[in-house]
Amino acid sequence: MRPLLLAISIAAVALRALQAGDAAAGKAAYDKSCKSCHGADGTPNPSIAKMMKVDNMRDLKSSDAQAASDDDLKKDITEGKGKMKAVPAAASSATDIVAYMRTWKK
């Protein structure tokens, strides 16, 4: 019984690690697909916000953004939100991008 529990525990930890994403890979994907609008550190680009006529572009390091679930953030990346369109180039890296965004958590 113990070997089975040990094997299940190891598998669960490995699965969580895979689901967590790679923050370093996420930074590269974020820099390529997100940085121009959301800034290098998650702070909205005021020029883009003005151009898109958005008064409340989300600061990605804010407690509000950081409180969103990983699934919700991935959905925002892959499906868009508000005036933000889906980012197809970032869809395959959404898990990694979210892992990178979590490094800004205060």
Image: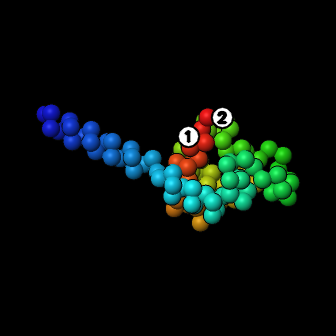
Q: Nearer the viewer, residue 24 or 98?
A: 24
Question: Can see residue 10?
Answer: yes
The answer to whether residue 87 shows anywhere in this view is no
Measured as percent of width and height from the top left, residue 36 is found at 72, 60
Q: Amino acid at mark 1?
A: Ser
- The residue to which callout 2 is attached is 63
The residue positioned farthest toward the bottom in the image shown: 89
Element at label 2: helix
Q: Which mark is residue 69?
A: 1
Q: Position of residue 74 (x, y in %)?
A: 56, 51
Where residue 94 sits: x, y (%)? 54, 55
Left or right of 73, for residue 57:
right
Label 1: which secondary element: loop
In this rendering, would 87 be left or right of 71? Answer: right
Q: Which residue occupies the foreground of this view, 89 or 29? A: 29
Quarter occupied by the N terminus:
top left
* Amino acid found under the numbered disc labelled 2: Ser
Q: State the residue in front, 62 or 80.
A: 62
Q: Look at 68% across and 48% down and name the residue there.
A: 42
